[in-house]
Amino acid sequence: MQVSRKNMVIALFIVTIIGLLFSRALLSLSCGFWFIAGILSLFNKATPFNPHPLFIWSVTPLSLSLLGLWQYPFEKANYDLVLSWAAYPAIAMGAVFIRASGAATVCKKIWIYGAAIAALYPLLWLLFHFSDAIALIKIGKAIPVFMDNDHLRFSIYIASALLLSYTLENKKLKQLLIFFFIAVLLLLSVRTGVVMALLIIIANFVYWLLDTRYRLRVTGYGLRVIQNSNLETRISKPLNYGLQSTVYGLALLLLSLPFLSQKLNYTLYDYQQFSTKGYNPAYSDGVRRAVNNASIEAAKNNYI
């Protein structure tokens, strides 16, 4: 029974990945299946129920939206928003269910390898349309990707795969995937993806620094810190790995420099248009710049 449940979880996870990349309808259905599977697992006591931080976090947006639903109870858009927020607890319950079924390691690898395979499409397109890619980024657009060309969601998916790659046990494969995903995010030149990659790299570097002095253990409620009794051994890691990583990082940066510079130029141009002409929703940063400007003005005038 345990084996069949594990296989069912893996199959459903593969369907979720396919829906994530190619079909929003399939993705929505898979979220519903995860919610049902989680409820049945709790009902059959296959998964012990406790207030897991991930589940508590997931129901928070839904709870806040329900508090304001009564003001416009017949507005269809409100229920669409509730359904969107309901995906969070469904995914959280699915994550808890995956771990309880013993399929977490397999699902993690499916997520990482699925991202690596999906990333080949924009890279191959870039290889054969280099000048077109430069022209697209110059006007604020992005290289074609899966997920209906939603480059923002796709970059977040690649960034999440980058984060999970740090947990792989195979050191050579881990290093290869980390640099591959960083290269993809840099070449896509989506600002959210680049910032996420930078935060992931910094967080893992800080974790490594702390782990040289303390033994860190990740638990469901955060990090558990244990004094390290073998400090000298852990600090004396080969320096050639750090040098090699630096060389690879510089090579990736130089390779993606034409795309990053075009994105930076477009961002500066977009913000300058707001300063001279005011708000224009036609620009991709129009709403973002207007919100930033309103926040700055509110802070200056002590409205908050």
Image: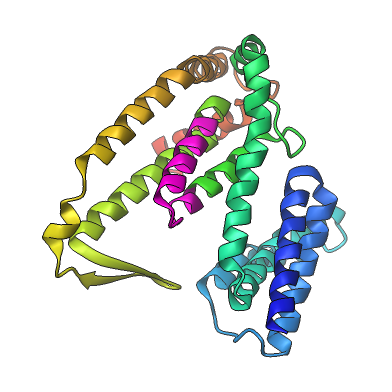
Q: Point out residue 292 in the picture as x, y percentages from the top left corner.
A: 51, 33
Image quarter where the N terminus lies is bottom right
Asked where in the image residue 37 lies, by quadrant, the reply is bottom right
The location of residue 36, given as percent across then percent down, is 78, 74
In the foreground, 222 or 303: 222
Q: Is residue 59 left or right of residue 271?
A: right
Residue 171 magenta-highlighted: yes
Q: Residue at x 42, y 73 (%)?
A: 221
Q: Which residue is rendered at x = 60% and y = 18% of the image?
A: 137
- In the image, 81 versus 151, the foreground residue is 151
Picture quadrant where residue 250 is located: top left
Left or right of 158 on screen, residue 93 = right
Rendered position, 24 above or below 293? below
Which residue corresponds to the image point at 54% horizontal and 25% vertical from the top-left? Answer: 187
Residue 242, x across and y down, in percent:
26, 39
Residue 71 appearing in the image = no
55 or 115, which lies in front? 115
Q: Is residue 94 left or right of residue 190?
A: right
Main secondary structure type of the part rendered in magenta: helix
Residue ID at (55%, 84%): 50
| Numbered disc total | 0
- Residue 301 within the segment the image draws in magenta: no
Inspect this view and state whether residue 197 appears.
Answer: yes
240 vs 74, left or right, is left
Q: Quadrant of residue 145?
A: top right
Q: Looking at the picture, how far across and down is residue 265, in whole percent?
A: 50, 14
Q: Which residues are magenta?
A: 163-185
- Identify whether 19 is placed above or below 253: below
